[in-house]
Amino acid sequence: MIIDHRTYTLQHGKAKAYLQLFEAEGLPVQLRHLDLVGYFTTAIGNVNELVHLWRYENMTDMERRRAARDADPDWAEYKKKTAGMLTRQENKILSPAPFSPLK
């Protein structure tokens, strides 16, 4: 199992609009193709950051699922609506330690 850990930094003042749009239009598409572990806003620190975690069996599974999502016409429409809202994106692939309760 791997976790895709994503941190998005949004334009100042765009977090609320982005979250509303994601919940209404992006999330339903993502859930058709991907396995959401968690989606978080920052309470202390950079208030314009969002962190989300997605679970995959392995890198091949991740590539296959993302390709299916990317081919979904609803995803293309959502991406058009959010264009320009992000200022930075950081991605990490995490693997659980042998003692991790999440595997």
Image: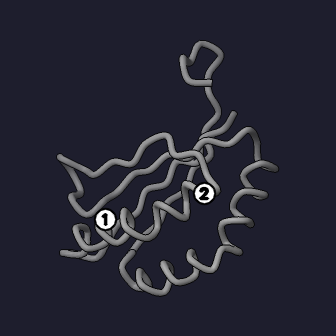
**Relative height, residue 81 to residue 69 (above, below):** below
Quadrant where the image shows the N terminus: top right
User: Element type at marker 1?
Assistant: helix
Which residue is pictured at 52% across the width and 48% down the height?
Answer: 5
Q: Nearer the viewer, residue 8 or 54?
A: 54
The answer to which quarter of the image holds residue 20 is bottom left
Mark 1 or mark 2, which is nearer to you? 2
Amino acid type, mark 2? Arg
| Colouring chosen for the image of the structure | one colour
The residue at the far top in this view is 99
Q: Residue at x 39, y 51 (%)?
A: 51
Residue 26 image point, x, y percent? 46, 67
Can you identify the residue that label 1 sits on?
19
Going from the N terminus, do you reach mark 1 or mark 2 first? 1
Q: Up-down: is 78 above or below 20?
A: below
Q: Is residue 57 above or below residue 101?
A: below
Judging by the rendered image, the residue that carries numbered circle 2 is: 32
**Residue 82 place in picture, x, y as percent:** 41, 80
Amino acid, disc 1: Leu
Q: Residue 66: give x, y in percent of width and height.
A: 69, 62
Give how far across and how far down residue 81 sits, in percent.
42, 84
Q: Looking at the image, which residue sits at the far right?
A: 60
